[in-house]
């Protein structure tokens, strides 16, 4: 571990209890399996619990709000906004396109800013701004204004998810086989990501309840009240972020983290050679853009983003059947969100609990996605189509495991982690800005979308294949680096490749 600066408190070793090499009692074994705590010293347990209380609570609450504010458009659309603002043709698809365009424009610059500006200032500020924009949706008069606000809110929300992943990667550790430590990161990303399902479910319940209880109050239709309520819920999340976000262990000023715990956090990062951010140089950028994680992750995210689009059309399909009430159309898709919530947590818990098995667990949601897409493409009847949408939801758990694996690929280089994740997510989102407009045009292909879902079935095969491409490169690099001395000291002119590719 690195030397301490003068004035730092004495750092208690976090490697191991003196009593052995792993959890001994039955409770310690259970604790290790459920929440990776059985092998730790009491000092490290307290540190990780503190990190969970603040980082995980802020990240999950913030992502819940982010998805609620961006995803409530579907519930508003099927609850009267379509008729009130006279949507027609493929304008529903354009709601996603304008949001995604704003997201793309904001995301890469935001990732670069996060290497220079404190996330504890930057992220809560944009959270507050997107909350204000959410209120604005309640007063729109025409479709063009909706499109403009969708673009703005996409741009403002772009820093959040990638910023959270960057922060988590700076505080949580991968597996250490020598110390028998279970992986911390995947399950926490899954909890964070599961907020997207909770937000979609809550939006459906909220809109259903508002439609019954608030529709027509003060002369406002229920879908406008939805945006007002979402705005009210969003503001506290932004204010909490100013307090809860800890930046990274090397420049942290969080009031809730004592100097002793901060020293422990730095020591944990030093043990795995995960250093703090440094200024980018041309040489470092050249290394990042020629290293294999950049392009494999880009392909993986393109295929995943497209393959999970069908769930956004579940409510549209239900509305087109003309057999359900507005309340039911908002309510039924929450079953798929609940399925996605449970399976996402399950996949990541297993991935961490089994010692960081990434590619093995990725195959499960990938297969779920392929089976679901084939069913949707064929669409033999109502029951089968409903099942197809449920399986599509059960495949979204691919994302947290993939990002946990990517963090391990790039675990030695904070800038590579931030840029690879940001660029890959941006390009993946770029494809869903136009692909659904072409193959899932609601004006032409609703309600079955047979052609579009057939194309996505092929893309689902490619998503499955990328697991083995990633495994090949990870295993190849691990073999090349085995027994080799580090290539650099960690400065920005001496990029050091990853040496922890996960369980390959």
Image (spheres, grey):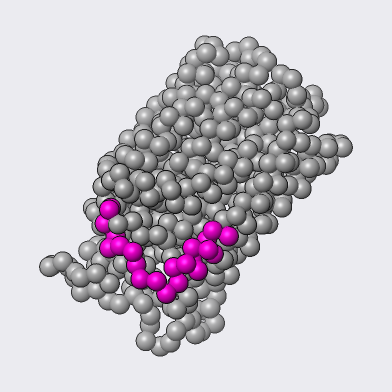
Is residue 143 among the parts visible in the rendering? yes
Residue ID at (53%, 78%): 29
Residue ID at (73%, 41%): 457
Residue 291 position within the rendered picture, expressed as x and y whole percent measured from the top left: 44, 51
Identity of the residue furthest to the left in this view: 6
Identity of the residue furthest to the bottom in this view: 19
Tell me if residue 156 is in the magenta stretch.
no
Is residue 55 among the parts visible in the rendering? no
Residues rendered magenta in the picture:
472-493
Image quadrant where residue 320 sits: top right
Residue 118 position within the rendered picture, expressed as x and y whole percent measured from the top left: 27, 44
Residue 216 position within the rendered picture, expressed as x and y whole percent measured from the top left: 58, 18
Residue ID at (43%, 24%): 152
Image quadrant where residue 450 sits: top right
Q: Quadrant of the C terminus?
A: bottom right
Depth order, front residue of 297/281: 281
Q: Quadrant of the N terminus?
A: bottom left
Identity of the residue furthest to the right in this view: 380
Depth order, front residue of 431/492: 492
Depth order, front residue of 437/182: 437
Residue 2 position within the rendered picture, expressed as x and y whole percent measured from the top left: 24, 69
Left or right, 78 with reference to 405: right
Left or right, 415 with reference to 434: left
Left or right, 380 with reference to 178: right
């Amino acid at each position: 571990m690195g030397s301490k600066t003068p004035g730092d408190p004495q750092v208690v070793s976090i490697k191991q209890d003196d009593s052995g090499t792993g959890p001994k009692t039955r409770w310690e074994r259970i604790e290790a399996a459920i929440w990776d705590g059985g092998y730790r010293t009491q000092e490290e347990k307290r540190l990780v619990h503190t990190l969970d209380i603040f980082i995980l609570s802020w990240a999950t609450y913030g992502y819940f709000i982010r998805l609620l504010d961006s995803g409530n458009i579907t519930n508003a659309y099927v609850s009267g906004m379509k008729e009130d603002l006279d949507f027609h043709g493929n304008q529903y698809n354009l709601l996603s396109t304008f949001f995604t365009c704003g997201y793309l424009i904001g995301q890469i610059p935001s990732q670069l800013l996060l290497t220079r500006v404190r996330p504890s200032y930057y992220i809560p500020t944009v959270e507050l701004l997107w909350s204000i924009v959410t209120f604005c949706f309640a007063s729109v008069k025409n479709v063009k204004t909706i499109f403009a606000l969708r673009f703005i809110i996409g741009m403002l929300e772009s820093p959040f998810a990638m910023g959270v992943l960057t922060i988590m990667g700076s505080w949580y550790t991968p597996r250490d086989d020598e110390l028998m430590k279970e992986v911390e990161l995947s399950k926490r990303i899954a909890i964070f990501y599961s907020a997207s399902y909770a937000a979609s479910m809550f939006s459906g319940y909220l809109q259903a309840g508002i439609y019954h209880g608030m529709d027509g109050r003060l002369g406002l239709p229920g879908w406008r009240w939805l945006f007002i309520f979402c705005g009210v819920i969003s503001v506290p999340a932004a204010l909490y972020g100013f307090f809860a976000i800890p930046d990274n262990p090397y420049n942290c000023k969080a009031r809730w983290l004592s100097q002793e715990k901060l020293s422990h956090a730095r020591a944990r990062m030093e043990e795995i050679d995960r250093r703090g951010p440094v200024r980018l140089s041309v040489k470092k950028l050249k290394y990042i853009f020629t290293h294999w994680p950049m392009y494999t992750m880009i392909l993986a995210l393109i295929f995943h983003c497209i393959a999970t689009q069908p769930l956004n059309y579940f409510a549209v399909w239900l509305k087109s059947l003309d057999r359900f009430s507005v309340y039911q159309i908002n309510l039924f898709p929450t079953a798929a969100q609940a399925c996605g919530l449970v399976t996402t947590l399950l996949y990541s818990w297993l991935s961490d609990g089994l010692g960081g098995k990434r590619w093995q667990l990725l195959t499960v949601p990938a297969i779920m996605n392929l089976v679901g897409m084939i069913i949707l493409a064929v669409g033999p009847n109502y029951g089968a189509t409903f099942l197809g949408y449920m399986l599509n939801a059960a495949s979204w758990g691919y994302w947290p495991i993939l990002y946990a694996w990517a963090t391990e690929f790039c675990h030695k280089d904070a800038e590579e982690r931030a840029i690879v994740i940001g660029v890959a997510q941006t390009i993946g989102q770029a494809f869903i800005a136009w692909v659904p407009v072409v193959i899932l045009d609601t004006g032409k292909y609703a309600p079955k979308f047979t052609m579009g879902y057939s194309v996505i079935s092929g893309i689902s095969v490619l998503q499955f294949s990328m697991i083995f491409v990633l495994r090949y490169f990870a295993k190849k690099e691990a073999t090349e680096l085995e027994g080799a001395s580090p290539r650099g000291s960690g400065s920005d002119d001496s990029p050091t490749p990853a040496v922890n590719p996960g369980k390959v």
